[in-house]
Image (cartoon, rainbow, N blue to C red):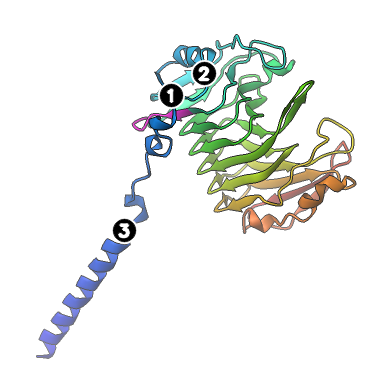
Amino acid sequence: MRKIGVILLSLVLLISLAACDSSNPDPEAVSETPLSEIYPDSDYTNIVPVSTASELADALNNLVPDTKIVLSEGYYNMKDSASADEFNGVAGWMFLINEDNVAIVAADDAEDVYVYSSDSIPNGAYVTQNMITVTGDNVVLAGLRIGERGSQNKAIEALGNNLIIDSCTFVDSAMTYIGEYNVEGAEWTIDAVTVKNSVFEDESSLVICNGVSGAIAVTDNTFLDGTDFQIIGSRLTGWNPVTVDVSEAVFSGNSFAAGATFTVTYDANDPQNDSLWSLDASSVASNFGEPEIIKTEYEDRRVIYTAL
């Protein structure tokens, strides 16, 4: 009888464990929501599928508001792309997104959509500095692997409001640079930006700088060894007179591998930077060591937190 009781008890335990497994499946078995459901075609007037760099360049040169460009799997070398449209009075931008409500997303069945440039144009005038330049509002970049421009400056410079970067991977020292830009008669005000579910590797970086405020959300991203998340505030003198306001920012779910850094730079004498003075690095990640504090060539205060 004792043996039968043990067998029955074992069966009960096995059934209970099976019930637990069915209600809490292995996270790896849970499928991710396809980008086509997150950014559905119904949200856009124009759907443009592309499969080559030249087709992507054509789509950008003929861009209109409410367009979704869907990239099939492949490598998109933008070195020969040059926009006929002007920004800041200049044409020839490599990858210009100058309309509102535009999504550039990977196709659901694409395992690798790599956007990069192998150009060797010297880094000089502003038009030569960026691979992707975003001046439109409500732009989405999703599911892409993004490398640097061959001239080694910014992979993305975002000047438009409410940019969403979702499920992208940044490689080859790619810098994503988000900040307000002022020209005579026009102002790009950024009061919302979202960077989520993305991976930074190969010394790539995310920079949020002057004039960004309000709904800043940097969530559920992975920063690997050698990468950096930077916030750059204002200086009393220099190119960034307006600070970053992180008083309403959300930083959650980010993972910093050992050797990844979080850097905050600002002029300690500028009262605009009060939200940066009180920024708690633990709100970004919980595994930072003691910060290194240095002064830059501009006499800014730079605080570097390195993940352990």
Q: Position of residue 93 (x, y in %)?
A: 63, 15
What kind of element bears circle 3? loop
Is residue 290 magenta-colored? no
Residue name at image x 38 percent, y 29 percent: 107
Give the spatial CA distance, label 1 vs label 2.
9 Å
Give the camera-side residue of 281 and 182.
182
- Of tags 1 and 3, the one toward the viewer is 1
Amino acid type, mark 3: Pro
What kind of element bears circle 2? loop
Residue for badge 1: 45
Q: Is residue 47 above or below residue 162?
A: above
Q: Residues in magenta? A: 104-110
Q: How many marks do you count on the picture?
A: 3
Residue for badge 3: 25
Residue 37 shown left or right of residue 304 in the figure? left
Residue for badge 2: 64
Q: Is residue 247 above or below residue 198?
A: below
- Of tags 2 and 3, the one toward the viewer is 2
Is there CB contact under 8 Å for labels 1 and 2?
yes
